Image: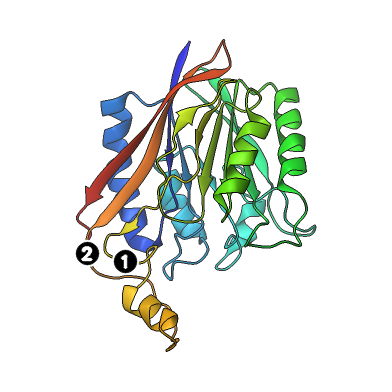
């Protein structure tokens, strides 16, 4: 049985949400998608975190959400009661929510895992590799037909290492967090679809979705508060993964980019 999954990169702000809700329904029909997973950790109005309202909006067109290092910057408490969203599995103990979960779509049970990298991000975190191992083992025990792992990390080397670490065990390993798409999407030797970073769904002409003037001031030594970008169209970035359910492997991965004219 063939299965087609869309993974959407980091959604930034309300404009990013509007683009996702505007674009995804047409893609479901036009591309014959069986499932849609979205990284929503920057979807809060200020670009950091996720709100319950933002989660509801994204889940009106998506099947499942992943998060990242900003998971609790806005309103992460609702994660305790939202089974369709996961935060990094390797956070320190005591955080709300869960690190992996499942959903049913297209005749298959899909497992979704979220882990956060340590290199250049938070070196004191528990190992994302050990967390991914636990998650994959648990999801296999729950009968997941396909497993997607969102590696929310800064270093491409750490993401690539995770891809090879999970090759043949997870069917999709995709990177988020840097908001800048990489050109290395491919199917690894063991049948895992991989991309170091999917990129963001946020304002074009910004710096990773935020005001470029604020970032330029920061880097030339005149730091000021960095606000979210508020002008220009939104660039929607995602990958489409084709999968063989019975063979438990990916057969292809392609990048997808759209522009959405958000006021």
Residue toward you, 90 or 74 = 90
Per the rendering, the mark at residue 34 is none
Residue 46 figure quarter: bottom left
Q: Is residue 139 above or below residue 16?
A: above
**Residue at 46% over, 64% down:** 44
Residue 217 figure quarter: bottom left
Q: Is residue 120 above or below residue 218?
A: above
The residue mark sitting in front, 2 or 1, is 1
How many numbered circles does the render carry? 2
**Residue at 75% over, 58% down:** 125
Per the rendering, the mark at residue 232 is 2
On the image, the x and y values in percent for residue 255 come to 35, 36
Q: Earlier in the sequence, mark 2 or mark 1?
A: 1
Whether pointer 2 and pointer 1 mark residues with C-beta atoms closer than 8 Å, the reply is yes
Figure quadrant of the C terminus? bottom left
On the image, the x and y values in percent for residue 199 come to 41, 49
71 displayed left or right of 106: right
Residue toward you, 114 or 223 = 223
**Residue at 77% over, 36% down:** 134
Q: Is residue 51 visible?
A: yes
254 displayed left or right of 260: right
Q: Secondary structure at mark 1?
A: loop
On the image, the x and y values in percent for residue 102 come to 62, 33
Q: Is residue 113 above or below residue 140?
A: below
Residue toward you, 41 or 119 = 119
Please rate how many residues cluster around mark 1, counting C-alpha atoms within 10 Å: few if below 14, some from 14 to 19, many from 20: some
Per the rendering, the mark at residue 206 is 1
């Amino acid at each position: 049985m063939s299965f087609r999954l869309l993974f959407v990169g980091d959604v930034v702000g309300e404009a990013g949400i509007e683009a996702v809700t505007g674009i995804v329904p047409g893609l479901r029909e036009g591309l014959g998608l069986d499932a849609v997973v979205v990284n929503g950790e920057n979807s809060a109005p200020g670009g950091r975190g996720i709100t319950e309202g933002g989660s509801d909006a994204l889940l009106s067109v998506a099947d499942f959400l992943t998060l990242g290092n900003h998971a609790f910057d806005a309103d992460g408490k609702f994660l305790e009661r939202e089974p369709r969203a996961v935060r990094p599995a390797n956070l320190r103990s005591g955080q709300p929510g869960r690190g992996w979960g499942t959903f049913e779509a297209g005749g298959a049970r899909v497992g979704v895992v979220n882990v956060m990298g340590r290199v250049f991000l938070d070196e004191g975190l528990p190992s994302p590799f050990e967390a991914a191992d636990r998650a994959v083992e648990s999801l296999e025990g729950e009968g997941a037909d396909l497993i997607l792992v969102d590696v929310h990390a800064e270093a491409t080397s750490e993401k690539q290492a995770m891809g090879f670490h999970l090759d043949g065990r997870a069917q999709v390993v995709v990177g988020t967090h840097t908001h800048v798409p990489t050109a290395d999407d491919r199917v690894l030797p063991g049948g895992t679809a991989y991309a170091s970073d999917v990129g963001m769904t946020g304002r074009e002409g910004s710096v990773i979705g935020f005001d470029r003037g604020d970032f330029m001031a920061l880097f030339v030594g005149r730091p000021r508060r960095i606000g979210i970008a508020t002008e220009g169209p939104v660039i929607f970035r995602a990958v489409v993964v084709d999968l063989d359910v019975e063979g438990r492997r990916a057969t292809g991965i392609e990048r997808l980019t759209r522009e959405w004219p958000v006021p």
